[in-house]
Amino acid sequence: MFILESKDQLEKAIIKAKKQRATVKFIAFGVYQVSGSKGNFYTVECKRGEHGEKIVSCECKAGQSVKSLVCFHAVSALALHTGLARQRQTA
Ligand SMILES: [Zn+2]
């Protein structure tokens, strides 16, 4: 799990996400499933914290680590999520 503060922290994961071409499945607003490197799927949740902070959590090993690593699943899901969030705001 990590708190999204700036786009800079996503850069490395974005590069990896582009290479992996992960499939993102929409489950619900804020809940997505992203394909892993072995064809498995990981659930990624994007939500707002108590103070409006953007919290992203992924169930893969990297996403669960205490180092709050940004994995490519999270970035792939975020790309879809931010697009949907924008649509909601303008709707
Ligand atoms: Zn992950």
Image (cartoon, rainbow, N blue to C red):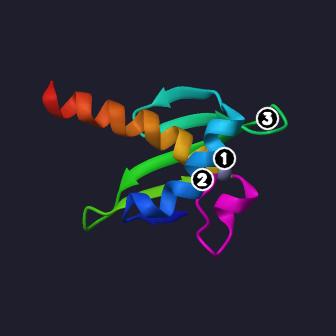
Q: Look at the picture and state if 64 lies above or below 27.
A: below
The magenta span reads: 60-71
Q: Is residue 40 left or right of residue 56?
A: right
Q: CA distance from mark 2 to mark 3?
A: 18 Å
- Circle 3 residues within 10 Å: few <14, some 14–19, many ≥20: few
Which mark is on residue 42?
none
Q: CA distance from mark 1 to mark 3?
A: 17 Å
Q: CA distance from mark 2 to mark 1?
A: 5 Å
Q: Amino acid at mark 1?
A: Lys
Tell me the quarter of the picture where residue 65 sits: bottom right
Along the polypeptide, which appears first: circle 2 or circle 3? 2
Q: Main secondary structure of the magenta part?
A: loop
Q: Amino acid at mark 3?
A: Asn
Residue picked out by circle 3: 40
Q: Is residue 52 left or right of residue 26?
A: left
Q: Residue at x 39, y 34 (%)?
A: 29
Q: Nearer the viewer, mark 2 or mark 3?
A: 2
Q: Is residue 61 magenta?
A: yes
